Image (cartoon, rainbow, N blue to C red):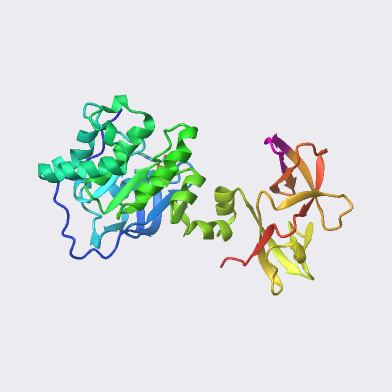
Amino acid sequence: MSTPAAVPTTDPTPTAVRPAGLTVDDLTVRYGSTTAVEHVSLDVAPAETVAVIGPSGCGKSTTLRAVAGLVPVAEGAVGLAGRDITGLSPARRDIGLVPQNYAVFPHMSVAANIGYGLRARGTATPRREERVREMLELTHLSDLAERRPDQLSGGQRQRVALARALAIQPDALLLDEPLAALDPQLRGGLRRELAAMLAATECATLIVTHDQREALSLGSRIALLRDGRLVQFDTPQRLWDDPVDAFVADFLAGAVLLDAEVADGHAVTLDGRWRIPVGDLAVRPTGHGAVRLLLRHDSLTVTDDADAAALLAEVTHSEFTGDGVHLTVRAGERLLGVRVPPDARIGRSVSLAVAPGRATLLSPRA
Ligand SMILES: Nc1ncnc2c1ncn2[C@@H]1O[C@H](COP(=O)(O)OP(=O)(O)OP(=O)(O)O)[C@@H](O)[C@H]1O
């Protein structure tokens, strides 16, 4: 197990004026000739949790590392609690970091691990012991205070790392894939526990994950990155309901976003190959013109070949899911998903219709 990241050794900043939480302003980070993060801006209010999400290599960890001061900022600024911390060393940032492998000191007890940052700051023993007790309680580790990390489960070690990061009462908490190393069976329970623990803190929390479910359930807002750039920064609901582009729709919800045109009571899409009666759509257009059609996994059904509004599509893949079969079909250049009952007799092509009220029309994005 690797050694933990540097822990702040200075006294906390006076708390008189602390207007803002964490701000990342036009951040660019380069590793030599590789630009890992490009012009990313986001903010996290005190007591808020923002999830940073995106495909592998999109710059999530780099964003976190730049906020922690572990990689240099090429352009832009990082602010915390009303001060510019861009040029500060990691130790002077009042930030608690839980790195990807939630490293803890293997030779120290749980309690000593949690109290480490406080000791490094010279916090008096009675206050330190009180704070360690509070953190043990918050993370449900009181009974394990004297154990060493190798006597703990993965989930318990993760809680020690979290408790240690929170013990110093940081202004910001950074969590890099906090549940990634855990068994899938453990993750659901720990996700709920983590949400409860984060709700009990006052710090601005930035959590990196590549798990859509984790982001949707833990973040009050989500920053979605692609190729080092911020694609959308919004509430989970708005990302779900109104994705800015097809990438966001697909990444977060496995949904498909098609450009469409409304004319003569139909939404026409896929280069005119599919004319969907607007009465079948969840949101009916008020006028004519360009719209976007959002299709989710339950938006389509297989219909009769004689259905005039049907779209003929070629089946490219079928996957048994227990309660049904998930078909991937090709319509022109686009791949769409449709669920059918397990006993459905499906040939090499299918006729698709919109399940009434299950596909949504969105306004075009500027
Ligand atoms: N130390 C480094 N030196 C050079 N390039 C790096 C370094 N660390 C990361 N990169 C590159 O920067 C880009 C962003 O990497 P980063 O680790 O931030 O992505 P990520 O979104 O966290 O990925 P993952 O989900 O796989 O952990 C990638 O192209 C990566 O290869």
Q: How many marks?
A: 0
Q: Residue furthest front?
A: 143
Looking at the rendered image, the quarter that the C terminus falls into is bottom right
| Residue 117 position (above or below residue 38) | above
Q: Residue 275: horizontal and vertical position, in percent?
A: 79, 61
The quadrant where residue 108 appears: top left
Q: Residue 248: horizontal and vertical position, in percent?
A: 55, 53
- Residue in the image at 37% along x and 30% along y: 154
Q: Please name whichever residue, 191 or 67, is drawn nearer the observer in this view of the structure.
A: 191
The quadrant where residue 269 appears: bottom right
Q: Is residue 350 visible?
A: yes
Q: Is residue 35 visible?
A: no
- Residue in the image at 46% along x and 37% along y: 187
- Residue in the image at 61% along x and 66% along y: 364
Q: Please name whichever residue, 121 or 268, is drawn nearer the observer in this view of the structure.
A: 121
Looking at the rendered image, the quarter that the N terminus falls into is top left
Q: Is residue 322 magenta?
A: yes
Ligand 1 sits in quadrant: top left
Question: In the drawing, does residue 136 fall left or right of residue 186?
Answer: left
| Residue 147 position (above or below residue 134) | above
What's the magenta bit mostly, secondary-structure-wise? strand
Question: In the drawing, does residue 288 fall left or right of residue 90?
Answer: right
Which region is colored magenta?
A: 317-328
Q: Residue 61: horizontal and vertical position, in percent?
A: 38, 44
Q: Is residue 351 magenta?
A: no
Question: In the drawing, does residue 100 fall left or right of residue 166?
Answer: right
Q: Residue furthest right?
A: 306
Q: Residue 72: horizontal and vertical position, in percent?
A: 28, 48
Q: Residue furthest bottom?
A: 287
